[in-house]
């Protein structure tokens, strides 16, 4: 059975092209950041956020080892600040990727929290270009995870028209769930 993280990367590879702008909202150990850097290539741009120095360090090393550091800017900031930091990117981003929860191998008490996750998701939608996607990996096995997941689902249910949503689940009950939100290109339907 495919891992859900692999499914997310396969879906992302269908929407991210060389030279694109993308955001990794939670760089953690850098697996997603490396994947994104490889997708956009040397002429693309990746902005990565995390609140832990340890995570940014691990991500920087992973990117350097793979010789993919070039297109990536890392910010030691909460993802709720992405709209401020990337104000010139509004409406130009192909994908914003969230991988919620705690840093694997790090302090399990430092987790993403709804108070900052929801504002960050709003900021992410503002950055997306038409046809851009928001990919949110939701973990529910750790304390606070289930509550955060439910809050994110309520947030997504209240989104106004203009987005196409999908929830991807694999059979394993402990596995995280992938919320996939596509921003519709409404200019295609206007006459
Ligand atoms: N995407 C990562 C990877 O590929 O290795 C895994 C991310 S890990 C599951 C979640 C990360 O979110 C942790 O490193 C944690 O420090 C970070 N985090 C927690 N609150 C945050 C916030 N407000 N803004 C940005 N990152 C945050």
Image (tube, rainbow, N blue to C red):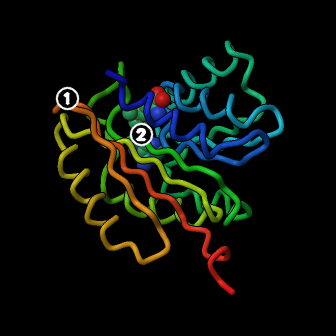
* Numbered tag placed on residue 127 in the rendering: none
**Residue closest to the eye, 23 or 183:** 183
- The residue to which callout 2 is attached is 99
52 relative position to 189: left or right: left
Counting from the top left corner in percent of width and height, residue 56 is at 56, 30
| Residue 70 position by quadrant | top right
Q: Does label 2 point to a residue whose CB lies under 8 Å from ligand 1? A: yes
Counting from the top left corner in percent of width and height, residue 158 is at 32, 73
Counting from the top left corner in percent of width and height, residue 16 is at 65, 43
5 relative position to 92: left or right: left
Say which quadrant the N terminus sits in.
top left
Q: Which residue sits furthest top?
A: 65
- The residue to which callout 1 is attached is 172
| Residue 73 position by quadrant | top right
| Residue 84 position by quadrant | bottom right
Point 62% across, 34% down: residue: 36
Point 66% across, 73% down: residue: 188
**Residue closest to the eye, 23 or 55:** 23
**Quick one: SS at disc 1?**
loop
Q: Is residue 67 above or below residue 142?
A: above
Q: Does label 1 point to a residue whose CB lies under 8 Å from ligand 1? A: no
């Amino acid at each position: 059975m495919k891992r859900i993280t692999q499914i997310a990367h396969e879906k992302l590879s269908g929407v991210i092209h060389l030279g694109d702008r993308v955001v990794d909202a939670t760089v953690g150990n850098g697996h997603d950041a490396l994947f994104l850097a490889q997708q956009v290539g040397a002429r693309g741009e990746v902005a990565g956020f995390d609140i832990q120095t340890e995570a940014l360090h691990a991500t920087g090393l992973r990117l350097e080892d793979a010789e993919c550091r070039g297109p990536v800017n890392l910010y030691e900031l909460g993802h709720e600040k992405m709209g401020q930091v990337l104000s010139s990117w509004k409406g130009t981003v192909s994908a914003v990727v969230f991988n919620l929860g705690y840093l694997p191998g790090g302090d399990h008490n430092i987790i993403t929290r709804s108070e900052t996750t929801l504002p960050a998701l709003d900021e992410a939608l503002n950055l997306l270009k038409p046809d851009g996607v928001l990919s949110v990996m939701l973990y529910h096995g750790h304390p606070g995870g289930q509550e955060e997941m439910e809050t994110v689902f309520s947030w997504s249910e209240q989104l106004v028209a203009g987005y196409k949503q999908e929830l991807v689940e694999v059979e394993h009950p402990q596995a995280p769930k992938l919320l996939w939100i596509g921003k519709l290109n409404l200019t295609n339907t206007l006459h």
